[in-house]
Amino acid sequence: MQTVPLTVRDARPHEYDLIGELTVEVYVHGGLVSPASSYVETLRNAADRAAKSQLIVAEAAGEVAGAVAYCPPGSPYAELAGPDEAEFRMLAVLAKARRLGAGRALVGECAARARAAGLVGLRLSTQSNMQAAHRMYERLGFVRTPDRDWSPVPGLLLLTYSLTF
């Protein structure tokens, strides 16, 4: 793995369009979402995520390499977290920045924010074909919670994981 300094920080308003396009690129070109899906507009709307959650970026070599929406209790973006848990959504890291630790740093920042808020855990949903992400989550201490698996649309089962503090 290359060593590239990463900066993890809150997204800036002038970056919202870039983050939206980055997220669409990762999800659509990565084969996770059909380009015809209505979800593409949700992925593209980083400004809405920033307004309703905490939009965090990983910056490598002066460029945004990835982003995630950290959803504290009360965020309308939280889909499965309980009242004393946070959740993260739409984790996206550019292909050219993979294996630099950006995903791990973004998830770590979400966990740090949840711990600092005194929450008991952090949750996430993921697609079954995202095995590299599953391995990362498990290395970070997340455990599968099959009792919380769910389907946002027919034919798509999302697997769930939880990190307990």
Image: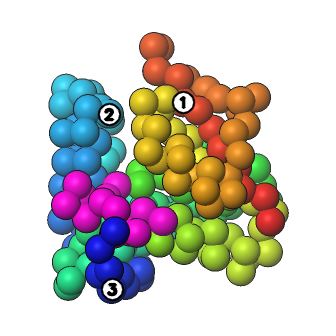
Residues marked 1 and 3 touching at CB (< 8 Å):
no
Read off the magenta span: 92-104
Residue 84, position in %: x, y? Answer: 79, 60
Q: Residue at x 19, y 39 (%)?
A: 29
Give the mark, 1 or 3, whose residue is nearer the N terminus.
Answer: 3
Numbered circles on residues, count: 3
From mark 1 to mark 3, how far is it between C-alphas?
A: 32 Å
Query: Seen in the image, is 119 located left or right of residue 50?
Result: right
The residues tagged by marks 2 and 1 sit, at their Cα atoms, a distance apart of 12 Å
What residue is pinned by disc 1?
A: 158
Q: Quadrant of residue 61?
A: bottom left
Identify the image quadrant of the C terminus. Answer: bottom right
Residue 140 visible in this rendered orientation of the protein: yes
Q: Which residue is found at the position 47% from the left and 72% from the top?
A: 105
Q: Which residue position holds label 3?
A: 5
- Mark sitting on residue 133: none
Residue marked by disc 2: 32
Which image quadrant for residue 19? bottom left
